[in-house]
Image: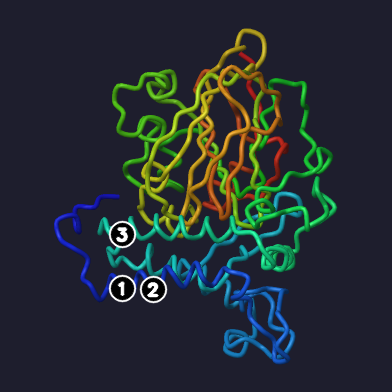
Amino acid sequence: MSNAAGANQPLPAELGKHLEDSLTHLVDSSKPSAVPKTAEGAADTEHPNDAIHVAPKKGRSWIAHLFPNQETVHNLFAMEHLGNYVIDRTSGKKVFEAMPLYVRVGMHLLFITGSGYLTYPSIESLLENQSIKQGELYDQTGDDVLPHIQSFINTYQLPLDELLVSDLTKYPTFNAFFSRRLKATARPITSPSDPLIITSPADCRLTVFSSVDQAKKLWIKGQEFSIQSLLVGDDKADKSFSALTEDPGCSIAVARLAPQDYHRYHSPVEGTVVSIKDIHGELYTVNPQAVNENLNVFTRNKRSIMLIHANLGPGREEVPIALVSVGAMLVGSIGWSKKPGDKILKGEELGWFQYGGSTNIVVFPSSAGIQFDQDLCANSEASVETVVRVGMEIGAITKQ
């Protein structure tokens, strides 16, 4: 995305104030104190800040009054880029992704309307400032933390039996809960000792592509997207990823994490960590509402890239693979659990995101010979994400 349209002129003061107020409201609406109240004054924790999916216990939302058929609302929102359908791989069902209404509308106004708001550098600054504010809110301790955690659990119906630490009072901040660990048995790894089987790096909404050209045709509409721009950014002298950036046949898997997902990511392969590179950038949303609207999200956003030498079987013991962790709107914090030189097993934890939804992109060179699973390919061809979990098989290495 170019800033050319607004780079040489300031954002009109009145418009700037409206946008700042809107972003501030988006952040403030996600605080525990913003949870809606029922008619009797008790907090409605079944679906705070989202009148679409569950009506309040006392009375009905204004959307429910206007559109009693929930499917009609979902179809309308999908048509107008106010949300998206995903396919649950376990059940095979096509479902409309849960998201607070104020977030839907805010992203639509900022990214979809064609207004050109994001061509102004001041908007990028606003997004960064609000991200910092969001992080500070979720790193606060105090009496609001436990109700906030419980509200989040109820909203997304998170299973507590998966938690490594099940006592919610042991999480001092909301971010501590958000980057929670799970029991090892909660995410079994497919064929852990078979180097030919590739697994999902995250609980995510996954799309897979055999080439960058296919990804840009079906999913990533930003014209700046390339393996070079993704892994190197503006550092033209960086040759550490040359085995990938100079390979025209790279395959990619795009794993988008929604707020309700488990936010630690894991290695899809066995191997050795070679290096980690940080690239400063913006904090645009990684939701399909933006990715599909010709925004260069992945190559403009803050990201951190781990280069792995993967063991993909005899004769391919050191195949270079990149795992890119992409920060997103109101989600700037990326952490790594491993360091260069560490040996990693398939399914082993690599790092985590703080609050929000973000993305891992795994880049495989043509020499890997990866063939993604057919169901994932078919869904991606239809421009629909598939909900998968850490450790699920997503593809296999073809024998050569």
Q: Amino acid at mark 1?
A: Lys
Q: Regarding mark 2 in the picture, which secondary structure is present there?
A: helix
Q: Amino acid at mark 2?
A: Asp
Please indicate whether residue 137 sits to the left or right of residue 329 in the image: right
Cα separation between marks 2 and 3:
16 Å
Cα separation between marks 1 and 2:
6 Å
Q: Residues within 10 Å of mark 1 (few under 14, many from 20)?
A: few
Check the image and report above or below for 255 versus 369: below
Q: Position of residue 36 (x, y in %)?
A: 63, 80
Q: Nearer the viewer, mark 2 or mark 3?
A: 2
Q: Regarding mark 3 in the picture, which secondary structure is present there?
A: helix
Name the residue tied to disc 3.
118
Q: Position of residue 148 (x, y in %)?
A: 68, 66
Q: Nearer the viewer, residue 297 or 16?
A: 16
Q: Mark 3 vs mark 1: which is more N-terminal?
A: 1
Q: Nearer the viewer, residue 175 or 219?
A: 175
Check the image and report above or below for 185 versus 8: above
Q: Which mark is residue 21?
A: 2
Residue at x 44%, y 65% (from the top left corner): 107
Residue at x 72%, y 74% (from the top left corner): 46
Look at the numbered discs 1 and 2 and tell me whether their residues touch, using CB distance below 8 Å. yes
Q: Quadrant of the C terminus?
A: top right
Name the residue tied to disc 1.
17
